[in-house]
Image (cartoon, grey):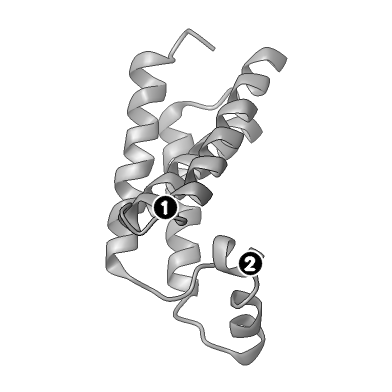
Amino acid sequence: MKRRRLYCFIILLLIIFLGIFSREFDEIPLCTGDFLYAVMMYVFIKILLIDKKPTQILIFSLLICYSIEFFQLYQADWINALRQTLFGRYVLGQGFLWSDIMAYTFGGFTAFLIDEIFLRNKL
C-alpha cells in the first residue's frame, strides 16, 4: 500500500507541474488546466482513500471540484483578496464558468477510466 501511495504521489506532482506549465503558454487552452485540476483532485483523493473503489473516488473528487467552482459565485471582499494571491488563484479560481464544470467532469472521468482500465491491479 505504501508503494501505491508513493506512485500516486509522484503522479500527483507531475500533474501539478503540468497544470502550472499549461497556464504559461497562450497556445494551450485554459480548459486544460481545469481538466488537469480534476485529474489532480482524483489522484489526491486516491492517495487519501487508497482502498476505496474508483467510483467512490470519482464522486468525491468531482464533488470537491464542483464545490470549489460554485464557491466562486461567493464574492465577499476577503475571499476576493485571497483569490488575488497565487495560492488563491490556483486553488480557489477566479470566477464561475460552466466550461470549468465540463472540464472537471472530463478530467475526473478520464482519471477514473485510466485508474479503472489501465491501473486496476498495477499499483
- Farthest residue toward the right? 2
Is residue 104 toward the left or the right of residue 74 in the image?
left
The residue at which mark 1 appears reads as: 33
Is residue 2 toward the left or the right of residue 25 in the image?
right
- The foreground one among 86 and 73 is 86
- Farthest residue toward the bottom? 77
User: Which SS class for mark 2?
Assistant: helix
- The foreground one among 107 and 30 is 30
Residue 82: x percent and y percent?
65, 77
Answer above or below: position of 59 versus 6: below
Residue 107: x percent and y percent?
36, 43
Q: What quarter of the picture does the C terminus occupy? A: top right
Residue under the image location 43 percent in, 76 percent down:
95
How packed mark 1 is, by other alpha carbons closer than 10 Å (few <14, some 14-19, many 20 or more), is many
Answer above or below: position of 6 versus 108: above
How packed mark 2 is, by other alpha carbons closer than 10 Å (few <14, some 14-19, many 20 or more), is few
Disc 2 and disc 1 in contact, CB within 8 angstroms: no
Tell me the amino acid under the disc marked 1. Gly
Is residue 47 toward the left or the right of residue 32 in the image?
right
- The foreground one among 66 and 35 is 35
User: Which SS class for mark 1?
Assistant: helix
Q: Earlier in the sequence, mark 2 or mark 1?
A: 1
Find the distance from the CA under tag 2 to the CA under tag 1: 15 Å
The residue at which mark 2 appears reads as: 86
Residue under the image location 44 percent in, 28 percent down:
54
Residue under the image location 42 percent in, 60 percent down:
66
Q: Which quadrant of the figure has residue 9?
A: top right
Tell me the amino acid under the disc marked 2. Leu
- The foreground one among 88 and 120 is 88
> Which numbered dot is residue 84?
none
Residue 79: x percent and y percent?
62, 81
